């Protein structure tokens, strides 16, 4: 979309928006800056977007574009900033956090977002980026770090919380085998913090996390005797699937009250 003409009055309003917002903003936020009620503000922003002076990210969410841009449609916003505005309160977790902390060598196109708001769809596409949404109550928003993206701060799960989320919901890491690979990177790297990992697992309240953690530490032959002992001492009753998306077939390992519906093999030592 090429830019079209704009009169002096609207140019002043647009300049105010450009100076105020360096990240996505809502109709209400723009209304506060320009002192306009929601309905006329919504119409004005829609007009700006139609003429190429703003980028519309989704319903009632816009982004300013550089005044010198000739084709705003080609400008892609940082997906983290888009998600932070669209799904707030939220944090980035799962494989997205793994990439951030260097816990995986895989590259993922989709962005994992944990949100505290009710959402209608668990998959949302904005500006050709797919966001996979996981809903949690805000009381479960712990173990988070603020990181800078451009001129804004967003929340991402810290390395220990990232691992707990993966063990709670392996699909956030690409399945239990991929979670095992992330655990090896975590355990053998600079981010390892076993007391914090156990604290977060207990605080989350899902004891299956401890089953999967203890089993993976043993199966992957990691040096973690003390942590394995804590996991064994806090097992819940009942049989849980090692991978909740792996089906209900596989032998049951009573030591961990787990159904081994996925095979885990230790990573080969580098030669």
Image (cartoon, rainbow, N blue to C red):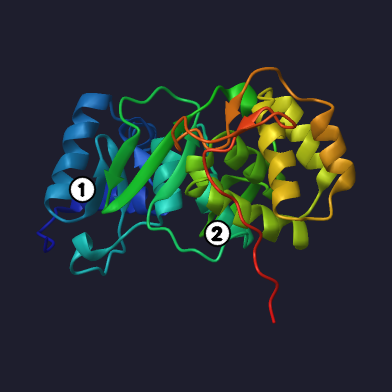
Viewer-side label of 2, 1: 2
Establish if 142 lies above or below 100. above
User: Which image quadrant for residue 245?
Assistant: top left
Looking at the image, is mark 2 or mark 1 earlier in the sequence?
A: 1
Quarter of the image with the N terminus is bottom left
How packed is label 2: few (under 14 Cα within 10 Å), some, or many (20 or more)?
A: some
10 Å crowding of disc 1: few (<14), some (14-19), many (20+):
few
Residue 188 percent location from the top left of the image: 76, 62
Q: Dividing the image into 4 quarters, which one contains the C terminus?
A: bottom right
The residue furthest right is 226
Which residue is under mark 1? 10
The residue tagged with tag 2: helix, strand or loop?
helix
Q: Which mark is residue 99?
A: 2
Left or right of 177: which side holds 197? right
Residue 34 x, y percent position in the rendering: 33, 37
| Quarter of image, res 190 | bottom right
- Residue sitting at 24 percent across and 68 percent down? 69
Q: Nearer the viewer, residue 118 or 3?
A: 118
Query: Which label belongs to residue 29?
Result: none
253 and 105: which is toward the camera: 253
Residue at 53% across / 26% down in the picture? 136
* Residue 53 percent coordinates (x, y): 21, 55
The residue at 26%/54% (across/down) is: 128
Secondary structure beneath disc 1? helix
Residue at 53 percent across and 56 percent down: it is 151
């Amino acid at each position: 979309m090429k830019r079209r003409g704009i009169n002096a009055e609207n140019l002043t309003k647009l300049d105010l928006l450009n100076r105020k917002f360096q990240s996505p903003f809502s109709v209400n936020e723009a209304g506060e800056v320009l002192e306009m009620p929601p309905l006329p503000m919504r119409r004005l922003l829609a007009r700006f977007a139609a003429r190429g002076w703003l980028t519309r990210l989704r319903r009632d969410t816009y982004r300013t574009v550089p005044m010198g841009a000739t084709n705003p449609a080609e400008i892609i916003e940082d997906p983290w900033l888009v998600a932070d505005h669209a799904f707030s309160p939220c944090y980035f977790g799962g494989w997205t956090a793994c990439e951030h902390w260097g816990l995986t060598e895989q590259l993922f196109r989709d962005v994992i977002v944990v949100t505290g708001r009710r959402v209608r769809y668990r998959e949302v596409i904005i500006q050709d980026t797919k966001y996979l949404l996981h809903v949690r109550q805000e009381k479960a928003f712990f173990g988070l770090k603020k990181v800078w993206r451009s001129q804004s701060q967003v929340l991402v799960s810290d390395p220990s919380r990232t691992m707990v989320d993966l063990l709670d919901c392996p699909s956030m890491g690409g399945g239990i085998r991929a979670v095992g690979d992330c655990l090896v990177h975590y355990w053998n790297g600079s981010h390892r913090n076993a007391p914090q990992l156990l604290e977060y697992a207990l605080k989350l309240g899902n004891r299956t996390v401890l089953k999967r953690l203890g089993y993976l530490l043993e199966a992957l032959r990691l040096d973690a005797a003390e942590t394995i002992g804590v996991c064994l001492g806090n097992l819940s009753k009942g049989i849980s699937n090692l991978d909740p998306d792996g089906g209900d077939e596989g032998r049951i390992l009573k030591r961990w009250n787990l159904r081994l519906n996925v095979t885990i093999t230790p990573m080969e030592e580098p030669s």
